[in-house]
Image (cartoon, rainbow, N blue to C red):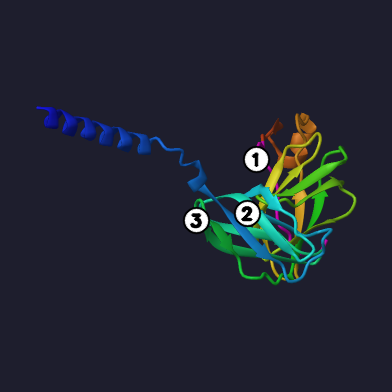
Amino acid sequence: MRRQSLLLSLSSLGLLGLGACGNLDNEPFRAGTVRGRLTDFDPAVALVSVVGLPGTRSGVDAQGRFVLTDVPAGPVELFILATADTAARVPLTVQGGQSVDVPDVKPRTAGTFLVKLHTRSSRKVLDAKALVQGTPVEISHLDDRAPYRVGPLPEGCYGVSILAPGFLSTSVQDCVGSGKQTALNVELVPENDSSEERCAFAGCEDGRHSSRDEHVMEAADDSL
């Protein structure tokens, strides 16, 4: 009887142990560390982040080395700014709880967006901001007087959001090539626009003003 009781006790302890394992904190295994080095860089510009997670970022040291911590486990892509004219994107897979060493990265000639803001209303566009979605790239203090260079950007496709006081936020997707410039003509729609302004944007039929709630933004192939 005593032996049977001892066996039962050991079995109970084993079950408790399994239960405890199931409740272990798995947080450290949901992210990993990424290490690497840029072969060419400008310390004042160089920045490494994760596409879609611009807050997960790192600068570089005097040798061009970077360390990214808390990178989500699974397939990710590094977004790398090296100099004012070079950049790179590097796909890799991160193992949770482990460190990944990226082979030396040689940045390539970057592309840019050339953004020109327009509006058919009487309102002027002032202090606008352009943000490249999922990246740390953003440009402030834009207006509707001249085109603005947004970059550098590694070759690829991106979403661009435009925020301007007094106008609806607008977004568009387009691509940039290595060493190339993609022109974006952006037409902004005023917030709380009057009937006359709504007519100017959407047109009028039979004396009635038609509504237009969608944002208007187009990528222009012609020169600005």
- The dot on residue 194 is none
Q: Can you say which quadrant of the picture contains the C terminus? A: bottom right
With 75 as the anchor, is 219 left or right in this view? right
Q: CA distance from mark 2 to mark 1?
A: 27 Å
Q: Residue at x 74, y 35 (%)?
A: 198
Q: Position of residue 157 (x, y in %)?
A: 64, 60
Is disc 1 placed on a helix, strand or loop? loop
Q: Is residue 26 covered in magenta?
A: no
Q: Is residue 182 visible?
A: no
- The dot on residue 51 is 2
With 209 as the anchor, is 150 left or right in this view? right
Asked if 9 appears above or below 93 in the picture, the reply is above
Pick the front one: 57 or 219? 57
Image: magenta residue range: 212-224
Query: What is the magenta segment's predominant secondary structure?
Result: loop
- Mark 3 vs mark 1, foreground winner is 3
